[in-house]
Image: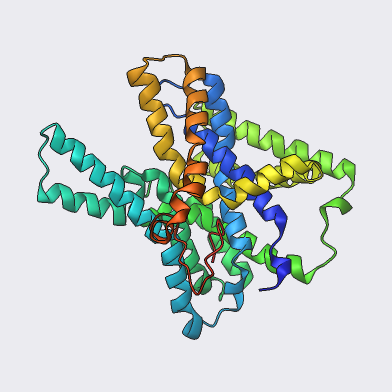
Amino acid sequence: MDNRYSIKEINYIKGIAIVLVFIGHAATPSFLERPYSYELIVQLIYSFHMSLFFLVSGFLSCKVIDMNLKEEYFNYVKSKFYRLIVPFLTISFITNFMILILKYIVNEPVTINSLIDMIKTIILYPENGVMGSLWFLYTLFVVSIISPFIIKLPIKITFTVSLLLNILVPQYKNFLSVSRVSFFLIYFLIGLYYRKYYFNNKKINVKGITTFKKVIICIISLTSVFYYSYIIANQIYISRYVLSILNFLCGLFGMILILIFIEKIRNFKICAKVLSFLGRYSLDIYLLSWFFQIVSMILTTKVLKITNYNLFFISNIVIGSLCIPFSIYILRKFAILKFLLLGEKSVKNSSIKSLNFNK
């Protein structure tokens, strides 16, 4: 693949996105009631952070536009299965097995029906399971394997249908992650087509936009994102369809804000290196940080009896960060663990590049 495709800004975007995911997970209301200030910040993050990953995933998947379905589709699906579904299944079954052990310890009955329900939940209702936070892998897999067919339609039909799905399909249709797929498909397609347009039009350049236009765009984006977050945080009722449109726009506005931010900090070498590092290991952080954060949550609330949410949050950040050295210095030393937990399958002394969700 052309080296032009290895745009370093992509790692910056993934680095920022995974930091937002990490913060959102650390500020959970599961063990302590989340204060309003945290609630507002979390809703601000949730308004666009996962859309960034789907935009980036589409951007990195533009080869599907010219894919020969008859000759290439099977290998494409197989590579996606290895990269996304193998870690999803491995971690889901590990966590559910841990739950079964705990039930056995406390003498809670485990029946065949409960085991069947567990497997059914993992495969058919991924968001309802113990590791519901892994919905991203499942959803990205579904989006990835249907996109080669969708893009065979005329582009106007493709975007019209995907936009209608984004706005009209209600939330909480968890069967086969229907709601998530419907919502995020359009971001994947936008990233995919933008990639093609980006390399066919060399004059595209954020720096070419005047400062005045950047300020106006930034104000509109910030206002929209804050307004949506305020509505959600305060549980203000507005029409579901209006809220859906605003939510869709927040995903795009969030990307605009991130691009403007990257343009400002890219010359600061330390910031650039940190974001690039986090971007390279974003999948590791996404998959493993929960285990470390759950230890932190139990330690602070159940063992130390801490009720101060600030201390609770800081502990989740610090202990959760241990997933990075754990992955680099322990997990990644074993090929089988890299494959089962990270979806990296070594082939002839080369491996799927870290954190590229789309190979």
Q: Which quadrant: the C terminus?
A: bottom right
Left or right relative to 101: residue 250: right
> In the rendering, at what x and y percent does residue 11 appear?
65, 52
Residue 261 seen in the current view:
no
Q: Is residue 28 left or right of residue 131?
A: right
Residue 207's place in the image compared with 99, above or below, is: below
Residue drawn 33% across the image and 19% down it? 303
Q: Could you tell me residue 124's position as x and y percent? A: 30, 56
Percent x, y of residue 235? 49, 27
Give the residue at x 51% y 42%.
325
Residue 163 sits in which quadrant? bottom right
Residue 348 lies left or right of residue 276; in this view the side is: left
Q: Residue at x 41, y 48 (%)?
A: 134
User: Which of 235 and 316 lies nearest the eye of the viewer?
Assistant: 316
Q: Is residue 273 left or right of residue 241?
A: right
Quarter of the image that includes the N terminus: bottom right
- For the residue pair 162 and 87, the one nearer the viewer reads as 87
Using the rendered view, name the quadrant where residue 242 is placed: top right
Name the residue nearer the viewer: 112 or 208.
Answer: 112
Does any portion of residue 359 appear in the rendered image? yes
Up-down: is 294 above or below 250?
A: above
